Image (tube, rainbow, N blue to C red):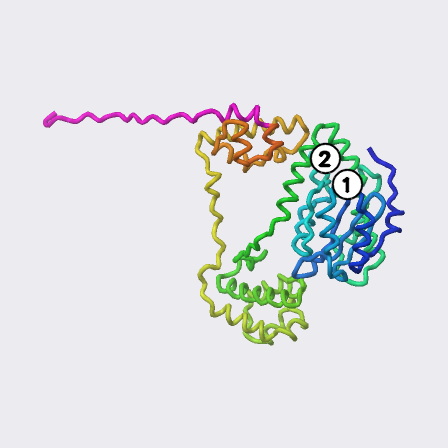
Amino acid sequence: MKSEFDPKPFVEATQLIEDVDSLKAFFAEISATDVVAVDIESAGFYKYYSRVNLIQIATRKKCAIFDPQKIKDFSPFQKFCETSDCMWVFHGGDYDISMLARDLEVYIPQMFDTRKAAEFLGLKELGLRALTEKYLGFSLDKRLQRCDWSRRPLTSAMKEYGILDAICLIPIYDQMTKELNRMNRLKWVKEECHYIAQDARKPKEIQVDPFAFRIKGSTRLSLRSLAVLKEVWQLREKISEKIDRAPFMVLSNNALLDIARQMPRSISGLSVIKSVHREFLNRHASELQSAIKKGLDAPLEGLERPTKARNRQTILTAWEGELAKSLREIRDDMANDMGLAASLLAPTQAIYELAKLRPSSVGDLLQCEILHEWQVRLLADNFIPLLQQEPPQESRKKRRRRRRRPGS
């Protein structure tokens, strides 16, 4: 059902906030609001480091854009999160919440994710653009999606694009909660959103991939070329990090591969590689030569990416495999009847873990924390009878060999 919603008055009244006093005044004005919609923009496509470059906030009556490049103190935002009991609305909010926590120490206490809600409503298209078309009757213009949001000053088009996403979230939230209530699924969504918010607030460990240099197109390189590629790739990472620029903008992947294949020993050799632009050579030719030489002299062991080992926790016996198959069939039938994705009711990995652990009661299912509470309540009646089964005992009786008598 589409509502008659005109975002234009909100766009025209949007306040650009660039200092802490204005930030404090804004949160004082919205202190009694029941819902706040949030969207953020980052320039991760252009920068080495992905940071919050813009924050768009909307309530039922007011909206504003916060500029983190100008605001040096976000304590009013932090305090509002601590004291307000409003609902925070996001679309695909796990990324936004984690960025706010990591960059600004702003911790969102509770949230509603319209993308997750769309899954529980059984919608096929989950993007915000599709939701605005379905619920509000107009389409969002996404031409500035890859805009460099670190650029200043902000253009009027950038500000309008940014704030529209936040403005649309609240009327979509209102209609979605009504639909979910009618379907008795609102509680499920809120529980899933609670997990999303809690997980997004946890500090993430940086996972370093030792084989990140194995870029697309490197599979046919010789081991010596791979050694050169690794050293040149590491040089590009070092330069990109120093100037905070996306690696592909410093030196393209095609240039890395061409250097690795040709392994030029001199600047003149480098200069004939068309994919290596002149500006990069003018600034980094000696460093590039050193990297190539280091790759030529490097040992060749450990350059091949090892085959991924199977997760031992998911290796099932034949009987456990049959149990998992039966659980999946139950899950799939229920999901089909409800018009939901099967993975939403129970991820396949969770099915494997249940088949291995075999919790035999509702309490055991809740305690093992393989499924969320709403999933347990929904699946327990059908899952538990299967999980209570005992695997067949293998016969330990072995046929005894008759001893042969001497001379027989």
Q: Which of 209/258 is in front?
A: 209
Q: Which residue is drawn at the image coordinates 67% and 27% (left, top)?
A: 338
Predominant secondary structure, magenta span: loop
Q: Secondary structure at mark 2?
A: loop
Image coordinates for residue 208, horizontal then vertical, percent: 55, 57
| x, y percent for residue 295 | 51, 68
Q: Quadrant location of residue 277? A: bottom right
Secondary structure at badge 1 equals helix
Tags 2 and 1 touching, CB below 8 Å:
yes
Left or right: residue 307 compared with residue 52: left
Q: Which residue occupies the foreground of this view, 159 or 223?
A: 159
Residue corresponding to mark 2: 123
Residue nearest the viewer, comparing 181 with 355? 181
Q: Position of residue 138 (x, y in %)?
A: 84, 42
Return the residue at label 1: 130
Circle nearer the N terminus (2, 1) = 2
Q: Quadrant of the C terminus?
A: top left
Residue depicted at 56% across the width and 24% down the height: 382
Q: Which contiguous range is marked in magenta?
A: 379-408
Residue extending furthest toward the left: 407
